[in-house]
Image (cartoon, rainbow, N blue to C red):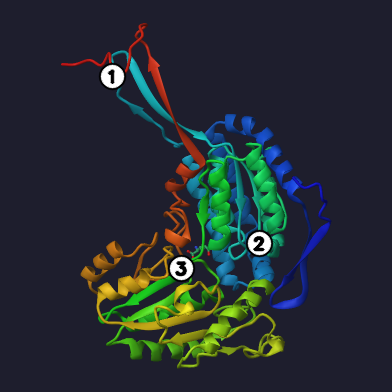
Amino acid sequence: MSTRLVAMNYVSTNPADLEDVVTTVDLVDAQAFTAAARRAKQAHRDWARVPAPVRGQVVANIGRLVEANAEALARLVTREIGKPLAEARGEVQEIADTCAFFVGEGRRLYGQTVPSEMPDKQLFTFRNPVGVTAFITAGNFPVAVPSWYIVPALLCGNTVVWKPAEYSAASAQAFYDIFAASGLPEGVLNIVFAEGSETFRGLESALQERLVDKVGFTGSSEVGALIGELCGRHLQSPCLELGGKNPMVVTEDADLDLAVQGALFSGFGTGGQRCTSLGTAIVHESVHDEFLRRFTAVTEAAVVGDPFGDVLYGPMLDGKFAVSYEKYLGWVRDHHTTHGSTGVGRITAANPRAGFLGDPDAGLFYHPVIVSGVRPDDELFLHETFGPIVGVTAYRTLDEAVELANRPGYGLSSSIYTTDPNKVFAFRTGISAGMVSVNNSTSGAEAHVPFGGNGKSGNGSRQSGVWVLDQFTRWQAVNWDYSGALQKAQMDTLSV
Ligand code: UN1
């Protein structure tokens, strides 16, 4: 473990106005991360002994506080990461919905009774908390996604170390303050601001010292693989919620206007910076040109700008995404494209930093880009771009469409626009995605259904709803013998 002290702070700025400093936080080093895990470990025994219905009451308090502070929190999220206010309000609502769901789970958290093969004997199962959980979350959903981890983890009797993204530090701190005011005992929830490599090393020591029992990570597939490797060395299976190259298949019988609305929202909503954002629209050859024409038209009419205004999307979440996005734009520029491959749409003059692609005064604002004619071996077809780029390609048979949809090797979200139920069936059973939308957007999952992906999108873990309980509890089998004799399974089994 390092003894180096990292005396650093991070300045979180408003991506729509880089002069506006939202907050400054101190970043701690690896040792401080491990120390937080130690605090969480100390707090665990008492928290696990609080009856689950009472833990549910704390979750109810959190939900009430979130609702009371909803508008302020949503505005802070918009200011800090540039997400349009309507989306930020929805995100805050998602925390309240998650709390509402898990308040009730405090009175369920069911185990089972299981018949024994021997007389005078009972078998039971109990859900036990896993212990200390450690979550590393991204900043594109700076409060909703952390709530998917933290609320059920707490409800199940775990304590938490949480490392949010630095660029959403103020939103994370406000979220933490709400949780801290809800009656959570000291040490149960610990927030740590640290840079990635210090977090990794801190987590490594915490796993080595057996201080952490379950890791959750939301972020890129590359970092997810490193976290998976690290956890695997300690025989742990983390929750990994990673990237996506989410396909949308549009069949020949689809309602094209509906499909175009779906493509606009899932491709360019949040500036394409959701793990569930649309990557490629795979459109039947007979409607491809018409789809492209209409999609281009609505995209050209869309307004990008001040996230407090009525816009499709605002700036990139943070400068670091603009840097990586420039690389993807390089792919676009190199590509043989049609329909405005270097940018369609316009940027509103309502924002003083408004400008056009390539204009240094545009700050972190980027045009939406539609790339037609993407081919299965193109980098643009295969890789997540985490920005406002949507590829469009044509297909002939549905089998071919499904093959194209699976080709990038991710498997988070997907969608099909069709009026033919047989095509829905073929798509649903052929696609290797954790989530399938029918005549709806790839993004915007509801907060109480299983969320997660396969392949490069994750290791099969699921968040939300009752499904997440399997991440944050471990089954304990209890074998209780009333007979007063040593009854041996398999050997003393009654036969008739
Ligand atoms: C993410 O981008 O990490 O389904 C999560 C959606 C949102 C969550 C996205 N509710 O688009």
In the image: residue 405, left or right of residue 472: left
One can see residue 308 in this view? no
Q: Quadrant of residue 470?
A: top left
Residue 406 or 71: which is nearer the viewer? 406
Question: Dot 1: few (<14), some (14–19), or many (≥20) neighbours within 10 Å?
Answer: few
| Marked residue nearer the N-terminal end (2 or 1) | 2
Q: Quadrant of residue 253?
A: bottom left
Residue 188 or 382: which is nearer the viewer? 382
Query: In the rendered image, which residue does mark 1 sit on?
Result: 490
Q: Quadrant of the C terminus?
A: top left
Please determine whether, in this image, residue 78 is positioned above or below residue 454.
below
In the image: residue 273, left or right of residue 459: right
- Given contact means CB atoms under 8 Å apart, are the residues at marks 3 and 1 in contact? no
Question: Dot 3: few (<14), some (14–19), or many (≥20) neighbours within 10 Å?
Answer: many
| Marked residue nearer the N-terminal end (3 or 2) | 2
Image coordinates of residue 113 in percent, x first then y, are 35, 27
Q: Secondary structure at mark 1?
A: loop
Q: Amino acid at mark 2?
A: Leu
Q: Which mark is residue 73?
A: 2
One can see residue 41 in this view? yes
Q: Quadrant of the N terminus?
A: top right
